[in-house]
Image: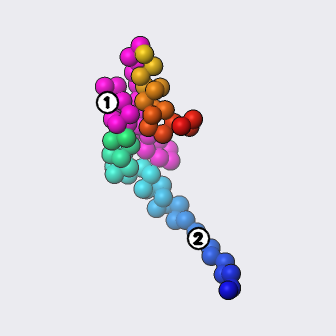
């Protein structure tokens, strides 16, 4: 068995275009709505990528619990 080295070079312009695309914004908004459908969301394009922010507090840490339930760092 020979071990061949494989070199992968990213097309940085293409990756940036994908990360800022309307399709990426739609995916982010969909995920944000799954996490907290009753919360306020804001989607915008930053310097390098699309961003969706979720705002709101139901008084019971609902947003924090939802993030943990849907893939937070500690779960």
Q: Quadrant of residue 5?
A: bottom right
Q: Earlier in the sequence, mark 1 or mark 2?
A: 2
Q: Which residue is mark 1?
A: 37
User: In terms of depth relative to the viewer, which is nearer, 73 or 25?
Assistant: 73
**Is 62 above or below relative to 6?**
above
How crowded is the residue under tag 1: few (<14 C-alpha within 10 Å), some, or many (20+)? Answer: few
Q: Per the image, is 51 magenta?
A: yes
Secondary structure of residue under mark 2: loop
Q: Is residue 42 visible?
A: no
Q: Is residue 54 visible?
A: yes
Q: CA distance from mark 1 to mark 2?
A: 39 Å
| Number of dots carrying numbers | 2
Residue at coordinates 34% horizontally, 25% vertically from top-left? 39
User: In terms of depth relative to the viewer, which is nearer, 4 or 65?
Assistant: 65
Residue at coordinates 33% horizontally, 41% vertically from top-left? 30
Secondary structure of residue under mark 1: loop
Residue at coordinates 41% horizontally, 18% vertically from top-left? 57
Looking at the image, residue 16 sits to the left or right of residue 2; the answer is: left
Q: Which residue is mark 2?
A: 8
**Is 52 above or below relative to 20?**
above
- Residue extent of the magenta highlight: 32-59
In the rendered image, residue 1, in percent from the top left (x then y), is placed at 67, 86
In the rendered image, residue 37, in percent from the top left (x then y), is placed at 31, 30
């Amino acid at each position: 068995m020979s071990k061949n080295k494989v070199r992968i070079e990213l097309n940085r312009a293409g990756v940036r275009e994908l990360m800022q695309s309307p399709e990426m914004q739609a995916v982010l908004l969909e995920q944000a709505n799954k996490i907290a459908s009753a919360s306020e969301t804001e989607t915008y394009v930053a310097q390098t990528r699309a961003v969706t922010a979720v705002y709101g507090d139901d008084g019971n840490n609902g947003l924090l619990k939802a993030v943990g339930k849907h893939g937070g760092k500690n779960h």
